[in-house]
Image (cartoon, rainbow, N blue to C red):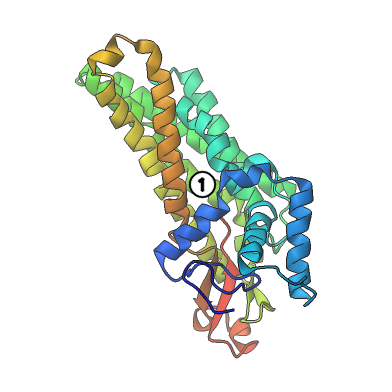
Amino acid sequence: MAESAECPVFQLGRPRYDQGSFLGRLRHFVEIIDPRTLFVSETRLKECIKLLDDYKHGTLPPGVSDLQLWEAQKVKQAIIHPDTGEKIFMPFRMSGYVPFGTPIVIGLLLPNQTVVSTIIWQWLNQSHNACVNYANRNATKPTPTSKFLQGYVGAVSSAVSIAVGLNVLIQKANKLSPATRMIIQRLVPFPAVASANICNVGLMRHNELSEGIDVLDNNGNVVGSSKIAARHAITETAFTRVVLPMPIFVLPPLIMSYLERMRFLQSNRRLLLPIHSVVCLVTFALSLPLAISLFPQMSQIEVSRLEPEIAMATDCKVLTYNKGL
């Protein structure tokens, strides 16, 4: 079958769209985070896995199209971890990040936060982030439970400390007008979440830095374990976790500050929360694929930049590693 612009020839384990361009990665991750995959039945998942296994072993039934194979791979990639081969718990899949994370974002951006409410919402947010980071990590090396708990406590502590500290500073800033203080207070979640997200990724995946992650050749064979590749993987993931909250925690407060001045909403205050929720949901849904598309999930690195023992073990110029999400 000739390759078409809409449906290229199926290649097992390869992305459907070109990962060398941002647009190709965006189209790829829009499929990975498709929330409809949350409702895929166990029967349908098994059918998809069997179809891909049949393709791999050359026993594919006649009449199966490339489109069906791409769809089967999309379902598998959205639900099954690429390293462990196990199902990712639904709330911690990337396809569940927006549906399960939006209520927390709404809570973080509610006006007039108290110290207690700030602590609760930051704790919920970093708990969800920690589980998502762990569930979507590079799992070529086992991670002890103690490492997970250390990372979790560190991430939650950093988020709460930064958020509460900034709120206290704003409350003491007597020179600010009430309106200005309100806007700044609404923007507090961004620096708190961005800083904590870096800590969260670093702490939750710290084991990768000490153990290294597998690097693969062109045929998918493991060449060795690289700490340098692990550093690249974690740095790229942490960067996306800083970019991701920018629009989520900056745009809704600014949009709501404008909308709240409208006469219609001033006379219908009960509509503020539903509108606030919709603004958060739309912003989150648009931001997630843009942020995680900055780097391909299966990233490549030149062998010359890796450890000498890895360079000696292969003739390839470039190796691949799972960055994680």
Amino acid type of the residue tagged 1 in the rendering: Cys
Using residue 271 as the reference point, say whether residue 304 is left or right of it.
right
Q: Quadrant of the N terminus?
A: bottom right
Which one is nearer the viewer's eye here, 23 or 155?
Answer: 23
- Above or below, 284 against 258 in this view is below
Q: Quadrant of the C terminus?
A: bottom right
Using residue 207 as the reference point, say whether residue 166 is left or right of it.
left
Q: Position of residue 104 (x, y in %)?
A: 52, 30
- Above or below, 92 against 13 in this view is above
Q: Position of residue 130 (x, y in %)?
A: 60, 43
Name the residue that disc number 1 marks: 199
Q: Residue at x 42, y 32 (%)?
A: 280
Q: Residue at x 39, y 16 (%)?
A: 271
Q: Residue at x 70, y 44 (%)?
A: 89
Which one is nearer the viewer's eye here, 170 or 189?
Answer: 189
Q: Is residue 277 visible?
A: yes
Q: Position of residue 215 (x, y in %)?
A: 62, 74
Residue at the outermost bottom position: 315
Quadrant of residue 270 within the rendered picture: top left
Using residue 144 as the reference point, say whether residue 128 is left or right of it.
left
